[in-house]
């Protein structure tokens, strides 16, 4: 007999937290309890459950689950489970097709169940923030592409079952130099899909113009995106994401270089890598933690990093398009604040722009470090 989640009514095959709840609702509730966030009802009525919009309102969703557990008198553990393998574990264990270890989530509470084809359509006319809606949709499609492609390219002894890819029950593993190059290819390729969905005018550009934009923004984009996810998932240590499903930290630096060419100076490479890990990632994570952007503010930042003001092109049409997109993004950000009753948000926008400036500086330093590894013959991979 098919069982239904008591919260969102989706079909389930397993219980979570001792009740008939889907994994997405269980993850949401644990995170909400752990963070002690005070949610506001999206409709200000407290009736989102009876109106069939429970997934749209975090307050009503949380209250519904809280009531279920209170009536059931269940004690809920909010402690996060580890989702990171050490080098020793990675070398000695095979990835279970249906591992119970939590997988990396997108910056949103769950990946929405949406059809990719629908994401190319214009945002509903009733939306007050259509640009943000398209950016969110484009980013979700981008993360799905990256997740599936990265997991499918793992070695056979680290096989990930398709069902684990679909329900996010795979392992985050330490990165290697060679694998990171391939995952960067995937990320850059998925940026084309992101841009096509988020910014319809992108499709009117020539192939050369598209590449001009993406080759000039992908490093900035990735620094913001990976830091945001790392702060969400690893707030208390030095782990960083170097792809959607792989991490790097001081403890795994030596392993990162394990698939470099045999004739390189691995000691020098390790020292250079360790210096980079001591400085740039920590600086990024500290700045991101201080600013603590919301999901919508995060979407604005990755969009502005795509249409960054450093774009230099002799094509007036491309420059006008970039300026127009930046204006539309900022207009939606103003609307986002206004609809939430925030009137004095100038200082908050200033904080976001300071974070973008910091991101720009760190991205430049990371690029210089990569070039240093290239000069040491450690990074012998092609340039993009």
Image (tube, rainbow, N blue to C red):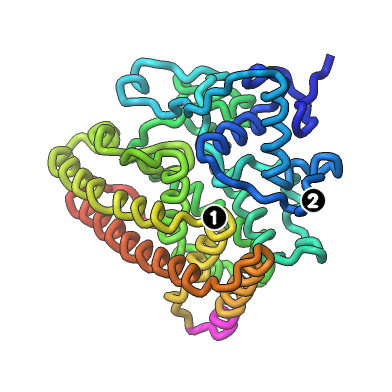
- Residue range (magenta): 314-320
Q: Is residue 264 left or right of residue 343?
A: left
Pointers 1 and 2 in contact (C-beta within 8 Å):
no
Element at badge 1? loop
Q: Which residue is mark 1?
A: 294
> Who is closer to the viewer here, 77 or 306?
77
Q: Earlier in the sequence, mark 1 or mark 2?
A: 2
Q: Is residue 344 left or right of residue 112?
A: left
Q: Is 317 within the magenta?
A: yes
Q: Is 196 within the magenta?
A: no
The residues bearing labels 1 and 2 have C-alpha atoms spaced at a distance of 23 Å
Q: Which residue is mark 2?
A: 45
Q: Position of residue 179 (x, y in %)?
A: 39, 38
Quadrant assignment for the C terminus:
bottom left
Residue drawn at point x = 31 percent, y = 50 percent: 281
Q: Position of residue 123 (x, y in %)?
A: 76, 61
Count the labels in the image: 2
Element at badge 2? loop
Q: Is residue 198 above or below residue 308?
A: above
Q: Is residue 33 above or below residue 279?
A: above
> Who is closer to the viewer here, 211 or 53?
53
């Amino acid at each position: 007999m098919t069982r239904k989640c008591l919260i969102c009514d989706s079909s389930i095959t397993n219980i979570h937290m001792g009740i008939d709840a889907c994994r997405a609702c269980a993850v949401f509730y644990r995170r909400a309890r752990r963070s002690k966030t005070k949610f506001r009802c999206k409709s200000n009525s407290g009736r989102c459950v009876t109106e069939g919009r429970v997934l749209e309102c975090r307050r009503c969703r949380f209250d519904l689950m809280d009531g279920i557990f209170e009536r059931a008198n269940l004690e809920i553990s909010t402690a996060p489970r580890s989702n990171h393998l050490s080098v020793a574990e990675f070398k000695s264990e095979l990835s279970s097709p249906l591992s119970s270890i939590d997988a990396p989530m997108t910056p949103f509470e769950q990946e929405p169940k949406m059809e990719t084809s629908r994401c190319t359509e214009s945002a509903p006319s009733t939306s007050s923030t259509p640009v943000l809606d398209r950016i969110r949709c484009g980013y979700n499609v981008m993360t799905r592409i990256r997740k599936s492609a990265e997991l499918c390219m793992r070695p056979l002894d680290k096989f990930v079952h398709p069902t684990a890819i679909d329900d996010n029950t795979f392992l985050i593993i330490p990165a290697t130099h060679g694998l990171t190059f391939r995952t960067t290819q995937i990320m850059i390729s998925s940026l084309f899909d992101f841009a096509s969905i988020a910014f319809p005018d992108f499709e009117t550009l020539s192939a050369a113009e598209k590449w001009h934009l993406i080759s000039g923004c992908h490093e900035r984009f990735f620094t913001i995106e990976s830091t945001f996810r790392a702060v969400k998932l690893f707030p208390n240590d030095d782990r960083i994401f170097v792809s959607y499903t792989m991490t790097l930290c001081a403890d795994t630096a030596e392993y990162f270089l394990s698939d470099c060419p045999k004739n390189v100076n691995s000691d020098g490479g390790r020292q250079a890598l360790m210096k980079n890990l001591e400085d740039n990632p920590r600086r990024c994570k500290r700045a991101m933690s201080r600013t603590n952007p919301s999901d919508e503010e995060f979407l604005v930042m990755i969009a502005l990093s795509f249409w960054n003001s450093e774009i230099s092109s002799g094509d007036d049409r491309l420059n006008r398009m970039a300026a127009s997109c930046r204006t539309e993004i900022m207009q939606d950000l103003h609307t986002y604040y206004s609809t939430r009753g925030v009137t004095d948000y100038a200082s908050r926008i200033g904080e976001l722009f300071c974070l973008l400036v910091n991101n720009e500086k760190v991205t430049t330093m990371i690029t210089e470090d990569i070039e240093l590894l290239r000069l040491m013959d450690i990074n012998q991979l092609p340039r993009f």
